[in-house]
Image (cartoon, grey):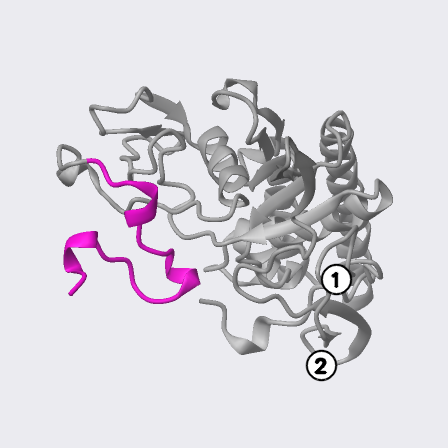
Amino acid sequence: MRNERSRGNEDCPTDDSTAGQPVGHENTYPHQTVETRINDGTLCSSAQFPAETPNSRTTTQYDKILVAGEDAILFEPSIGVDLGEYNLYTACPATIPDWKGAYRIPGNDLCTHLDDLREQVATLLASDADRDTIVACVKQHRTDLLETLADAARELCEYASAYDRPVLVTEDSHYEPDLWAWLTDPDAHRGTAWLLAMAHLRLRTVAAEYALEVATVPETHSSQECHGCGVIGDRPRGKTLRCCNPDCHVDVVHADYNAAKVLAQRYTPGQRCVYRSCSRSRSPPVTTAERPALVADGGPPRSPSDDP
């Protein structure tokens, strides 16, 4: 985990003034002010970030219409968006039959840029370079990184705009972006320290420009749950997920594509992970009504047989 002294340095070079602001039709919560400081404690800027709540959902999830004298519910098309490093954004609508129609935007160049910047800053810190020189270097690179992220977010929003009133659905676990931690903390991870958090904020900001709605759902097991049956799969290799349920049509699937599909499906009320692992794959199928709630929805996972 990041220590407290490294937190809050993110926006020192430049302030992303729109980061974290409510977008589209998203629920709004009381804002928390995050003061951003450089490592010597000098106040640089103040940014607003929304206080997220577990499983925060948009208040306008569906429209009700009258069909043949009965109420029918038309759900807005949900598009799951999985964030990562190898694939920065992976989008998959809940309406397509499988994951093969997913849309991905690679993040290799961003990762390389962040790695190179880390080495460059380490060299500067070990030299006689003054503070202003180092800050100017970080500021310029951060601007370039944000432009690349914004371009990727726009590409994703262009893809989503082909659908009628889409809802972009992401995980509800958001780290606070701290570029300085990535550049100076040897134990920091580029994804959790800066890249994934800032990619999420950039997506929200750009989605607002496109008037696209954004929602979040619980992240629990989203990278392990099979999109076809809900059983917890196996990750033999980092980029793939293997479903071990013999009754499921899914065999091996790209992990990022699968996660995006799972997130899209979780936007639908009542969608639950089965919490059945490979070792229990041959146990009787669990119905949707029997599925235990996600951890983020309350309580640890348990099987239906645990009920009194």
Determine whether 161 is above or below 197 in the image.
above
Viewed as shown, does residue 233 lie left or right of 199?
Answer: left
Residue 305 belongs to the span the image colors magenta: yes
Q: Is residue 203 visible?
A: no
Give the residues in magenta: 285-308
Rendered view: 137 above or below 281: below
Q: Is residue 134 left or right of residue 242?
A: right
| Place of residue 150 in the rendered image (x, y in percent of width and height, measured from the top left) | 78, 41
Secondary structure of the residue carrying tag 2 is loop
Residue at 80% from the left image edge and 62% from the top image edge: 13
Q: Quadrant of residue 67?
A: top right
Q: Position of residue 96 (x, y in %)?
A: 55, 22
Residue at 68%, 43% in the rendered image: 64
Q: Nearer the viewer, residue 93 or 39?
A: 93
Most prominent secondary structure in the magenta stretch?
loop
Q: Which residue is mark 1?
A: 129
The residue tagged 2 is 41
Above/below status of 42 relative to 69? below
Q: Amino acid at mark 2?
A: Gly
Q: Secondary structure at mark 1?
A: loop
What is the x, y in percent for residue 60?
Answer: 70, 52
- Residue nearer the viewer, 69 or 231: 69
- Residue 185, placed above or below residue 73: below
For image coordinates 77% across by 46% down, the residue present is: 146
